[in-house]
Image: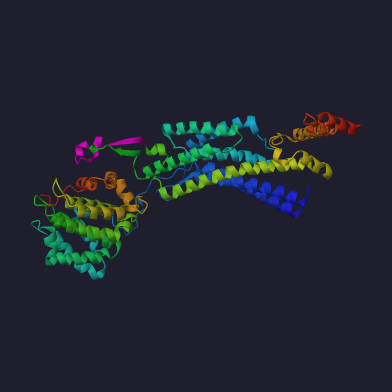
């Protein structure tokens, strides 16, 4: 292993640690809100619990496809950060209470599970759904900060334009009523602008951190495979890397394997590929390639006689 | 080798920081805040005037003497005389007519001086305005004479412009500021709609714009004064943010809190 390889391995580990720190910071920011007294208070455990269930469902489904068992403190932190990051991300966008929360949770479990089966931490569909849910949460928080306890109010055409107070109850329709308790507002009310700023920043950090962590984890894993190959003599290692190029390590099932199984798999793949190449070369040498250019017809017999003669 | 050691150190440090932040994120979720504490509920300073709302109530004249030592020396004599003249207004004269008289002009000059003074002087100014509202006629009546209510509302407008936001966070002035806001809204409701049909759109817009500037910030969120008004009279703020009958909430709150301030000297 060369000096640049060591640097590369260090870089992947550093990226993995930094992405975990980014996820943790995002988790912290989505967990706080500024109340009317100017104090930072928590957003409660209820939505985090639901978020944890959604993240756990995705995690368990990922176990069957591409789960990499933690091998050291850093990879253990990476796995835990992924699980916690998803839990905080889901908790950060859920409507904090009521029937909506469970409907949203159901949808997110389905999207995250689908992504996990495909080997993605956050697929495009899941990110789009999370953004929409965040916008919905910010909207109802805004409505609540204005002491309007419904998602929206629609004016009834014609009736709403009549200037009679006794018609007030039927001049508009309230959609999606909720209570301050459902919103999880602090007792002193919520200070809307800074709270929304902090939540949005936290959401962005969580998404960035999770995507970055997935890539850094893959690079870290590739560094481990690279190190296993470079335990061989340098010349042999170079040949093995030509036989098993890095771009194919994922497809070849080298990632996420335990140490011993990794070495056995490399061994098996090298034997298999070398044997296949030798077979191919042998077949190539034995093949009468000039015969394949015989187009038949008038010159066919002449060409065959000449090429056979040449072979002899 | 040294490079590898440095890298390992930075990775370990970052990982430990991430773990600590995660622990903090989980712990902070359980932190519940305290209920909102109204400025009036905070601990009183020894020289704070007690129960300041009484100085705006029906029996305010009984405590008016407590304000005299709190007015600065240069204005004290003037305060004593003006306060006495306001307390002795008889026969319920129309507000703007009394304010146009010699004692009325003297009162208006004193109000301007008091508004620019200390918080106790601001309370003294508000006391005088409420006493004027109690002892003069400002109800528009069937002839829709709104100039009297408009004049009184103007005095409250100037007081709120000078003290509204500052008063909202003050132990002594927070509740009087809410009372002044509600009184302003209720008076402007009478000015903008003196009779059941029709109305003065200019006055309504003027009142709405001023109240919005006092009660909401640029993002449409309630200011400290807005929060104080909402805590006592939630319907008033809700109606102000609506599209119709925007001042009705203030009228209802004012009639409930000061039933004797009917614009006809309680007759």
In the visual, does A259 lie left or right of B26? right
Q: Quadrant of residue B176?
A: bottom left
Name the residue rendered at 83%, 44% in the picture: A235
Q: Which residue is rendered at x = 23% and y = 55% of the image?
A: B206
Q: Is residue B35 left or right of residue B177?
A: right
Residue A85 part of the magenta-drawn span: no
Q: How many marks?
A: 0
Q: Position of residue A115 (x, y in %)?
A: 57, 34
Q: Using the image as rendered, state which of residue B131 and residue A134 is in the foreground.
A: A134
Q: Specify the farthest residue to the right.
A: A312
Q: How is the structure coloured here?
A: rainbow
Q: Is residue A160 in view?
A: yes
Q: Answer yes or no: is residue A231 visible.
A: no
Q: Nearer the viewer, residue B88 or B44?
A: B88
Residue sitting farthest toward the bottom: B74
Question: Which corner quadrant holds the C terminus of chain A?
Answer: top right
Magenta extent: A160-178
Above or below for B155 versus A191: below
In the rendered image, the vertical position of residue B238 relative to residue B73, given as above or below: above
Q: Which residue is pictured at 40% across the width and 36% down the height?
A: A182
Does residue B108 appear left or right of residue A153 in this picture? left
Q: Position of residue B29 (x, y in %)?
A: 50, 42
Q: Front-most of A42 and A222? A: A222
Percent across and percent down for residue A160 are 24, 39
Q: Position of residue A299 (x, y in %)?
A: 81, 31
Q: Quadrant of residue A70?
A: top right
């Amino acid at each position: 292993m060369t000096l640049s390889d060591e640097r590369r391995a260090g870089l992947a580990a550093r990226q993995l640690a930094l992405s975990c720190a980014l996820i943790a910071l995002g988790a912290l920011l989505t967990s706080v809100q500024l109340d009317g007294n100017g104090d930072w208070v928590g957003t409660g455990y209820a939505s985090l619990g639901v978020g944890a269930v959604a993240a756990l469902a995705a995690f368990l489904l990922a176990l069957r496809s591409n789960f990499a068992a933690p091998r050291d403190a850093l990879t253990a932190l990476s796995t835990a950060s992924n699980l916690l990051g998803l839990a905080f991300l889901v908790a950060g966008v859920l409507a904090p209470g009521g029937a909506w929360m469970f409907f949203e949770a159901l949808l997110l479990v389905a999207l995250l599970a689908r992504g996990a089966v495909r080997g993605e931490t956050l697929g495009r569909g899941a990110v789009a759904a999370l953004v929409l849910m965040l916008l919905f949460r910010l909207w109802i928080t805004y409505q609540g900060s204005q002491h309007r306890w419904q998602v929206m109010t629609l004016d009834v055409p014609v009736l709403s334009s009549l200037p009679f107070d006794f018609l007030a109850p039927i001049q508009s329709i309230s959609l999606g009523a909720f209570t301050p308790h459902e919103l999880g507002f602090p007792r002193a009310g919520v200070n809307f602008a800074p709270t929304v700023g902090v939540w949005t920043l936290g959401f962005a950090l969580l998404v960035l951190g999770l995507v970055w962590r997935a890539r850094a984890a893959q690079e870290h894993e590739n560094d481990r495979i690279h190190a296993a190959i470079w335990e061989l003599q340098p010349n042999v290692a170079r040949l093995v890397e030509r036989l098993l190029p890095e771009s194919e390590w994922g497809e070849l099932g080298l990632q996420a394997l335990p140490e011993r199984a990794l070495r056995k798999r490399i061994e098996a793949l090298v034997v298999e590929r070398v044997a296949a190449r030798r077979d191919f070369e042998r077949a190539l040498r034995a093949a009468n390639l000039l015969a394949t250019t015989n187009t038949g017809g008038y010159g066919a017999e002449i060409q065959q006689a000449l090429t056979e003669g040449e072979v002899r | 080798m040294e490079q590898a050691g440095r890298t390992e150190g930075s990775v370990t440090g970052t990982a430990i920081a991430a773990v600590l932040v995660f622990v903090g994120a989980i712990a902070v979720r359980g932190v519940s805040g305290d209920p909102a504490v109204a400025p009036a509920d905070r601990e009183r300073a020894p020289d704070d005037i007690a129960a300041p709302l009484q100085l705006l109530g029906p029996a305010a004249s009984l405590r008016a003497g407590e304000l005299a030592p709190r007015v600065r020396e240069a204005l004290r004599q003037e305060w004593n005389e003006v306060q006495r003249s306001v307390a002795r207004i008889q026969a319920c004269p129309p507000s703007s007519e009394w304010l146009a008289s010699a004692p009325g002009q003297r009162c208006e000059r004193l109000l301007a001086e008091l508004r620019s003074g200390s918080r106790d002087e601001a309370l003294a100014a508000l006391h005088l305005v409420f006493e004027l509202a109690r002892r003069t006629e400002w109800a528009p009546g069937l002839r829709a004479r709104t100039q009297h209510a408009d004049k009184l509302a103007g005095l409250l407008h100037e007081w709120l412009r000078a003290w509204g936001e500052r008063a909202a966070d003050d132990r002594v002035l927070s509740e009087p500021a809410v009372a002044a806001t509600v009184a302003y809204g209720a008076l402007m409701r009478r000015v903008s709609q003196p009779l059941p049909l029709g109305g003065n759109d200019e006055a309504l817009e003027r009142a709405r714009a001023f109240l919005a500037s006092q009660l909401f910030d640029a993002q449409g969120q309630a200011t400290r004064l807005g929060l104080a008004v909402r805590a006592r009279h939630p319907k008033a703020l809700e109606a102000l943010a609506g599209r119709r009958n925007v001042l009705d909430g203030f009228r209802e709150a004012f009639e409930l809190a000061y039933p004797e301030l009917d614009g006809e000297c309680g007759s």
